[in-house]
Amino acid sequence: MARPLRIEYEGAIYHVTARGNERSKIFFTKRDYQKFKEYLADGEFKYGFLLHAYVLMTTHYHLIIETPDGNLGKIMHFLNGSYTTYINIKRKRSGHLFQGRYKAILVDKDGYLLELSRYLHLNPVRAKMVEKPEEYPHSSYGSFVSDRKEEIVTRDMILGMLTGNGGNRGERYKKFVESALGEELKSPLEKVYGGMMLGGEGFIREVLSRLKDEQMEGTEVSHRKALRASVGEEEIVSALCEHFTYFTP
């Protein structure tokens, strides 16, 4: 099976997701959700990452993580490993909890972070688990729009991207998210390039410039042909990027 490339650098922002093995549950009780958030807090202390948003679903989770120290691999090894050990002990089971490796997509914060946070926070609504995002207790949405602030969530970057007058930033964010209720909201993740990047042409070029030749060797690297072509052929990058629809908050 092709393995995704991992590009780590200081200040990178990722959309990270992991699913249960064979799409099985990873959260079984309310305590499990809380325990996962405790590991997030521990990970922030140990590895210095910033959590911009999260949604914990029954069979998978979504995180938007910023890594000031460029150490995503260490963060995810701690988070998934610790939580798997907790579940295995609690439920007297063994083996893998998650299906394969986590998936991490580099995100261009200037063009996609705000839209991506809305898409994640509406995930429980699309799954018909609740009618409004604030009714779902296992996401960071409440930290943005209510007094239910969580210390693990860093809100300033996303809220700072909102424009317009009237109300405080939380109220404007609520209005922004609720404006998509009842609509067929397209996933920003449909615009992911090379299996690993969500952003405009300049962002893609900057990320590709970080790829080392040795990272591209081997037949198992997913999207290797497209990524190689993009590094070596300027016109291919331009042509592909022309197909992107850019989001302007």
Image (tube, grey):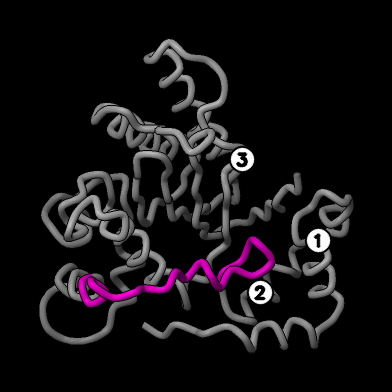
Crowding at mark 1 (Cα within 10 Å: few <14, some 14-19, many 20+): many
| Quadrant location, the N terminus | top right
Q: CA distance from mark 3 to mark 2?
A: 23 Å
Asked which secondary structure carries label 1, the reply is helix
Note whether 201 is above or below 83 in the view shown.
below
Q: Nearer the viewer, residue 20 or 65?
A: 20
Q: Give the amino acid at mark 1.
A: Arg
| Quadrant location, the C terminus | bottom left
Residue 222 spot, x, y in % from top left: 75, 55
Look at the image and say whether residue 192 sits in the magenta stretch: yes
Instruction: Name the residue carrying label 2.
Output: 204
Asked which secondary structure carries label 2, the reply is helix
Q: Give the amino acid at mark 2.
A: Ile
Give the mark nearer the N terminus: 3 vs 2: 3
Crowding at mark 3 (Cα within 10 Å: few <14, some 14-19, many 20+): some
Instruction: Name the residue carrying label 1.
Output: 224
Q: Residue at x 43, y 51 (%)?
A: 63
